[in-house]
Amino acid sequence: MMKNVPREDRPRERLAKLGAAHVSNQELLAILLGTGTRDESVQSLAERVLMHFEGIRLLQDCTLEELTAIKGIGNVKAVTLLAAVELGKRINQLKPQDRYCIRSPEDGADFVMEEMRLLKQEHFVCLFLNTKNQVIHRQTIFIGSLNASIVHPREIFREAVKRAAASIICCHNHPSGDPSPSQEDIHVTKRLAECGKMIGIELLDHLVIGDHKFVSLKEKGYV
């Protein structure tokens, strides 16, 4: 039945093109059902399921027996729907873990020191923070000598937007153990700070990590 449907009207293609948030409940349900029947398209079947449950709210309490009682819903389709509903419930019940809060350069350095102080290559790491200065994500952006042509602000701030970060802290290590910032460190810091101001996602600090030592470029006046 799906062969005669234009590609842009197919639920899977629409989700891939527009994102999950931009497809309807009926289309999401159609994706889960996968196929219709000999006499009915998957979209029509999905519509009937929604009508049976008066929308999606009552789906959270559906049973295997109730689903398989609907014409066109066999055991496989019913089990798939039940699994999706249960997964949604479990995600909704997740409690946020205690997040590390950064209130000072020392807090930021402590968060990464043990992982970064003995690395044999330079690692450029970004910490993405929420409005409470709690770390919501940590990501290594690149490995190698720091260079403005390699550290692309767009890569850093794309991830910040994706994570809905309010601010970021950048960190990189000096394998020599000496955290004294180079001119390239300073240049990269200023570039990132300027980009952050334009985008509205503040660069709080750039920490250079040595062996049990660090330098805050914010404290040095470069942020």
Image: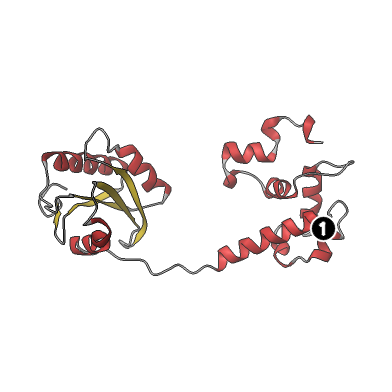
Q: Which residue is at a point 22% across and 40% down the rendered structure image?
A: 145
Whether residue 47 is visible to the viewer of this picture, yes or no, is yes
Q: How is the image coloured?
A: secondary structure
Quarter of the image for residue 64 reads bottom right
From the image, tell me which residue sits under label 1. 75
Say which quadrant the N terminus sits in. Answer: top right
Image position, residue 175 (x, y; %): 18, 50
Query: How far across and down, in percent of the image, does residue 109 sit?
Result: 21, 60
Query: Is residue 63 depicted above or below 165 in this figure?
Result: below
Looking at the image, which residue is at 14% across and 59% down? 213
In-image side of 56 versus 66 (left or right): left
User: Height in image: 174 above or below 105?
Assistant: above
Q: Out of 147 and 122, give the one closest to the viewer.
A: 122
Q: Nearer the viewer, residue 37 or 193?
A: 37
Check disc 1: other Cα within 10 Å, few if <14, some if 14-19, many if 20+.
some
Q: Is residue 88 above or below residue 186?
A: below
Residue 55 in sight here: no
Tag 1 secondary structure: helix
Tell me where residue 186 appears, x and y as whole percent. 14, 42
Using residue 188 as the reference point, say whether residue 91 is left or right of it. right
Q: Residue type at mark 1?
A: Asn
Q: Is residue 177 left or right of residue 33?
A: left
Viewer-proximal residue among 139 and 58: 139
Q: Residue furthest front?
A: 120
Q: Which residue is drawn at 17% across and 48% down?
A: 223
**64 to 200, vertically: above or below:** below
On the image, which quarter does residue 106 sit in? bottom left
Q: Where is residue 147 in the image (x, y as percent from the top left)?
A: 21, 36
Number of dots carrying numbers? 1
